[in-house]
Image: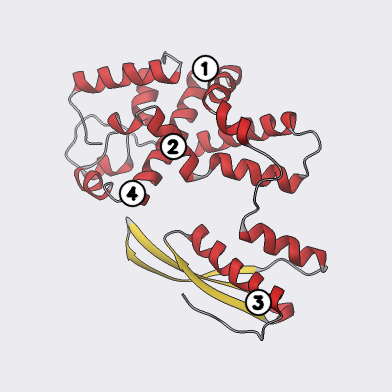
Amino acid sequence: MNAESPNAGAQGRAALQTRLGHRFQNQALLRQALTHRSTHRSAHPGCGDSNERLEYLGDSVLGLVMAEALFARFHAATEGALTTMRARLVCNQSLAAQARRLNLQACLLLGDGEAKQADHHAHRDSILADAFEAIIGALYLDSDMPTVKQVLLQHFAEPLQQSSPHQHKDDKTRLQEHLQKQGLPLPRYEVVAQQGKPHAPTFTVTCQVSELQASARASGGSRRSAEQKSARKVLALLQSHAEPTCPHD
């Protein structure tokens, strides 16, 4: 995932467009979508703007297309079930998998230091997921919504086919539903510590249900992971009617 020579980069982007199923009229948009912010801290000339703004746009476009597809497919699904299914489709792991199918990693422009850090699996997934969203943002600007929908529905055909409102619910959803059944407010999550290097952080999160005097603390490689673990602990406490404690990993 290093910066490439102009010719190799052009060849890589041409192959990427074939795999994507769209030929960009504005090639500068595609190059920007593949440009990580770390290039601005490197000695790679001509990299242009990074893909952060395109990532922001692509995230919104992707969410809308997936929401509409799920809404049309599952007529009886509740709002909560639709939200859970969409979250699975657009999570980092799912988007990184889509990026790898496109061999996106071969086309990314990274600063020298970032390219070395990207050997860490979780960090590499984050970079790939962000770049995939940026590609969607660039695709939207280069064409129109019908074109974006056609491309995305083709690439997400299998994940959409496998989606189901009866899939296993994550721990945060299970805890939320458990509390709602009792007419209680939602739990509160708070990041109490963040340690480690920027490319491999560890988050420590507390989950509190003050009304039941229940709380738990857990750590994970992402905020979401730590929240899920702490929610699982609180749910276990409530279901077992244990005395309120604050367990640690």
Mark 3 — residue? 237
> In the rendered structure, which amino acid carries the disc numbered 3?
Leu
Q: At 43% from the left edge and 39% from the top edge, which residue is drawn?
A: 96
- List x then y, in percent, for residue 197: 30, 62
Q: Secondary structure at mark 2?
A: helix
- Residue 71 is left or right of residue 217, and the answer is right
Which percent across, then down, holds residue 151?
A: 53, 20
Which amino acid, by three-letter code, is at mark 4? His
| Of callouts 3 and 1, the N-terminal one | 1
| Labels 1 and 2 touching (C-beta < 8 A) | no
Q: Residue at x 32, y 16 (%)?
A: 14
Q: Which residue is tagged 1?
A: 143
Q: CA distance from mark 3 to mark 1?
A: 52 Å
Disc 1 to disc 2, C-alpha distance: 24 Å
Q: Do tag 4 and tag 1 residues touch (Cβ < 8 Å)?
A: no
Residue that label 4 marks: 121
Which image quadrant for residue 188?
bottom right
Q: Residues within 10 Å of mark 3 (few under 14, many from 20)?
A: some
User: Which numbered disc, 3 or 1, marks the residue closer to the eye?
Assistant: 3
Alpha-carbon span between mark 3 and mark 2: 35 Å
- Report the Cα–Cα distance between label 2 and label 4: 12 Å
Q: Earlier in the sequence, mark 1 or mark 2?
A: 2
- Element at badge 3? helix
